[in-house]
Amino acid sequence: MSEFTFHTQENTEGKTKALLEGVQAGYGFTPNLFAYMAEAPTTIEAYLAMNELISKGSFTPSQQQVALLAASKENGCDFCIIAHRAIGKMSKANQQTLDAIHNDTAIENPGDRALATYVRKVVKQRGFVSDEEINEFIAAGFTKQNVLEVVLIVSIKTLSNYINHLTNPEPNKELLAML
């Protein structure tokens, strides 16, 4: 595997340093994902912008984390699975749902189950979901707006999950402590 530089506020300068300082201020620590993303600062900018847009969408914070976790699980991204389990817990997402997504077991909450199932279909089928699958998602209490916002969630997870596949960051101790 190729070696990528682990950027820190101490070994960078200029725009990259400012971005990492902003991440540090926002999260209270610098998730290791960003230390590798800093190789291409525009990826940090894109991630932060997409994250902000997701927060303005129609999903609740706990639904956002369920969807982000489901996409990360489907993409096989260990770092983001840990991150979204931890942030999901902070967002008061249903713990059984978070555990079930992580362990590939049944999700008891019907809304969470429908959301996670739909997100995983979008990832697995690369967006080619059927009208029937969309209608099942909507029948579970979601909207056409939610259908499209899932694509935004899958987009941010494609960015971060794929970068993590390339760089293989270790989970931060801060994230592990939140579990």
Image (cartoon, rainbow, N blue to C red):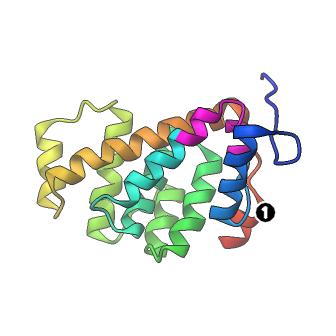
Residue 7 vs residue 51: left or right? right
> In the image, is residue 26 part of the stretch drawn in magenta?
no
Up-down relation of residue 159 to residue 107 (above or below): above
Q: What range is drawn magenta here?
A: 33-45
| Residue 73 appears in the picture as rendered | no
Which residue does the image show at 32% across and 39% down from the upper left?
122
Note whether residue 129 is visible: yes
Q: Is residue 78 left or right of residue 107?
A: right
| 138 over 155 or under it: above or below | below
58 horizontally vs 171: left or right: left
- Name which quarter of the figure residue 34 lies in: top right
Residue at the image position 63 percent from the left and 47 percent from the top: 78
Residue 49 on image: x %, y % = 47, 47
Give whichever of 171, 120 is nearer the camera. 171
Q: Residue furthest right?
A: 10
- For the point 11% across and 59% down, the residue is 139
Question: Where, quadrant-wise, is the C terminus in this rendering?
Answer: bottom right
State the residue lying farthest toward the bottom: 92
**Placement of the N terminus among the 4 image quadrants:** top right
Residue occupying the far front of the picture: 14
Q: What residue type is labelled 1?
A: Lys
Q: What secondary structure is found at the residue carrying circle 1?
A: helix
Residue beneath label 1, please?
Answer: 173
Determine whether 50 is above or below 92 in the image.
Answer: above
Residue 77, percent across and down? 59, 43
Position in image of residue 134 (x %, y %): 16, 45
Q: Is the magenta stretch mostly helix, strand or loop?
A: helix
Residue 34 on the magenta span: yes
